[in-house]
Amino acid sequence: MGFISEYNHTIDPKGRLIIPTKFRCELGSSFIVTRGIDKCLYLYPMKTWEKFQENLATLPINNEAARTFVTFMSGGASQVDMDSQGRILIPGYLRDYSDLIKDVVLIGSGARIELWSKERRDQKVKNIDINAISEALGSQGFNIGLGM
């Protein structure tokens, strides 16, 4: 089914974060955290990350945008291990990139989890025009309705 739902948590002063119980099983005890688009972080289960890496490997090395994207995603990646209390240590460079200080939001996004600073996520949600987005996706042939 993939990751769904949203959870508010905090990061402690050492950079540790408790992973919500509902996400732990599918993530596994060791997984990847990397930079995400919109200054959030992406958390990938190992198998999903491996498939993502395979897709990245197909991008043309002679294309500057492709090289930049691969470096951005792979270069920013870190393998993390969950402790017995369900905590991970988020590397400082990733906390800095995404402005994670204390209050955070973990959001299930299908194949991955997004980790946002609460302030940035609240601002982004406040500015979403979901009607315009659904119309744009509908005009591209994406069926927004439940009946497929």
Image: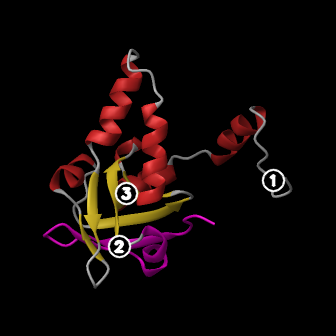
Q: Using the image, determine if residue 138 lies above or below residue 22.
A: above
The reply to whether the magenta stretch includes residue 139 is no
Looking at the image, can residue 114 be seen? Answer: no
Q: Is residue 138 left or right of residue 33?
A: right
* Image coordinates for residue 139, horizontal then vertical, percent: 77, 32
Tag 3 secondary structure: strand
Query: What separation in Å lies between label 1 and label 3 (alpha carbons)?
Result: 28 Å
Residue 80 x %, y %: 27, 63
For residue 38, what is the image quadrant? Answer: top left
Please state which amino acid type lies under the numbered disc 1: Gly
- The residues bearing labels 2 and 1 have C-alpha atoms spaced at a distance of 36 Å
Which element carries disc 1, helix, strand or loop? loop
Residue to which mark 3 is pinned: 116
Residue 24 highlighted magenta (yes or no): yes
Task: Let me know if residue 26 appears in the view.
Answer: yes
Precedes in sequence: disc 3 or disc 2: 2
* Mark nearer the N terminus (2 vs 1): 2
Q: Which residue is mark 2?
A: 29
Q: Which residue type does callout 3 highlight?
A: Trp
